[in-house]
Amino acid sequence: MSVALSSDKMLNIHQIINYLPHRYPFLLVDKVIEYDEDALVALKNVTVNEPYFMGHFPENAVMPGVLIVEALAQAGAILAYLKAKSNPQKHLFFLAGVDNAKFKQVVLPGDQLFLDVHIAGHKGSFWKLHGEAKVDGKIVCSVDILSAMKEIGQ
């Protein structure tokens, strides 16, 4: 999936931290490149300085697949916050399910991981998202994610 949108729909890291409660080392979205009401494309720059590379095959470092899924879930949460006109001070998104996860190639230090997500459905507090992570235009991971939005204080 590719989203053709205007370039004024970008978010830098300072804006992203207003939409995600995650912080280092679990903040996995560096920039939102473009978005509209139902789709978003974000970027994760994968560097050798990531803490997981010290223990995840240090002699042949690859980004763990579960963290690729987490990066897609975070990009999806930003999209859902934008659509719901909310933020982590009002609501939190929790991972409720992961289906159809497929990993097609490894992600290495130095790669730019493009996170392409769209809303597949929304009912009540549940959000269904589809995500594809790409490197050099090739899909490295695709997944269906179910998130549950919970109001803070409940």
Image (spheres, grey):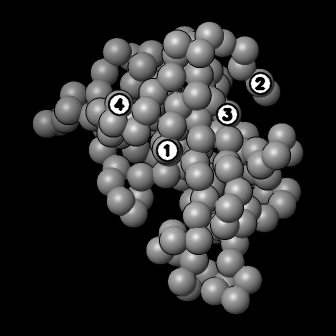
Q: Amino acid at mark 3?
A: Asp
Q: Quadrant of residue 38?
A: top right
Q: Is residue 97 above or below residue 88?
A: below
Quadrant in which residue 134 is drawn: top right
Toward the viewer: 66 or 28? Answer: 28
Q: Amino acid at mark 1?
A: Asp
- Identify the element where label 1 is drawn: loop
Tags 4 and 1 touching, CB below 8 Å: no
Q: Is residue 34 visible?
A: yes
Q: Give the residue number, with chain letter if any, for mark 4.
A: 15
Residue found farthest to the left? 153
Residue drawn at x 66%, y 67% is 109
* Residue type beneath disc 4: Gln
66 lies above or below 133:
below
Mark 4 element type = helix
Q: Amino acid at mark 2?
A: Ser
Decide which of tag 4 and tag 1 comes sooner along the chain.
4
Label 3, residues with CA under 10 Å away: few <14, some 14-19, many ≥20: many
**Nearer to us: label 3 or label 1:** 1
Image quarter where the N terminus lies is: top right
Q: Residue 30: which disc?
A: 1
Disc nearest the viewer among 1 and 2 = 1
- Residue 2's disc is 2
Q: Label 3 to label 4, Cα distance in Å? A: 18 Å
- Front residue of 144 and 9: 9
Mark found first going from the N terminus, 3 or 4: 4
Mark sitting earlier along the chain (4/2): 2
